[in-house]
Amino acid sequence: MRILIVDDDPDVGDTFVRLIEPLGHDVVRVTDGPAALDRLRRDRYDLIIVDVVMPGMNGLEVMRKIRAMDPTARLVALTGTGLDFSDILPGIGIRVVHKPIGAPASISDLLAAR
């Protein structure tokens, strides 16, 4: 599985890479929305995990643009805020996962996102 991680926090992005790559997946990490959209213009990903709160282009805007590019993209919104997007995003096919994420069981659950 090819996975794109979009998170402005390098520690979070690196942690995802360290947890997911050993499971046999190809993981690419970028730190902002424009870089994610650039990657998506050039490459195809099976799963895109996007942090909701980022400077500049926030994750909700990134996901909106991704949806416009590819209506079938598998998207996961990653949030560490106290805001609950679970009543909005699943209705448009975006799964919400809250930080911090626990180890193996949570990662497997995240990768199974539809």
Image: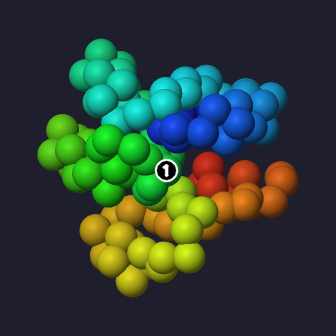
Q: Secondary structure at mark 1?
A: strand
22 relative position to 7: left or right: right
**Percent from the top left, x then y, of residue 56?**
32, 41
Crowd around label 1: few <14 · some 14–19 · many ≥20 (10 Å): many
- The residue that appears at 30% across and 16% down in the rendered structure is 42
Residue 61 versus residue 9 in the image, above or below: below
Dividing the picture into quarters, in which one does residue 1 lie? top right
| Whether residue 61 can be seen here | yes
- Give residue 36's position: percent from left, percent from top: 37, 30
What residue is rendered at 84% in x and 54% in y?
Answer: 103
Residue in front for this viewpoint, 60 or 81: 81
Using residue 3 as the reference point, say whether residue 69 is left or right of it. Answer: left
Q: Which residue is mark 1?
A: 51
When asked about the image quadrant of residue 16, the answer is top right
Give the percent coordinates (x, y) of residue 70.
22, 41
Question: Foreground: 70 or 31?
Answer: 31
Given the current orientation, which residue lies at the most extreme left position? 68
Q: Position of residue 29 (x, y in %)?
A: 55, 27
Task: Looking at the picture, tell me which residue is in the foreground, 29 or 43.
Answer: 29
Q: Amino acid at mark 1?
A: Asp
In screen coordinates, is 74 left or right of 101? Answer: left
Q: Residue furthest front?
A: 55
Image: 91 above or below 24: below
- In the rendered image, the residue lying farthest to the bottom is 87
- Count up the numbered dots: 1
Above-or-below relation of 32 to 83: above
Residue 4 visible = no
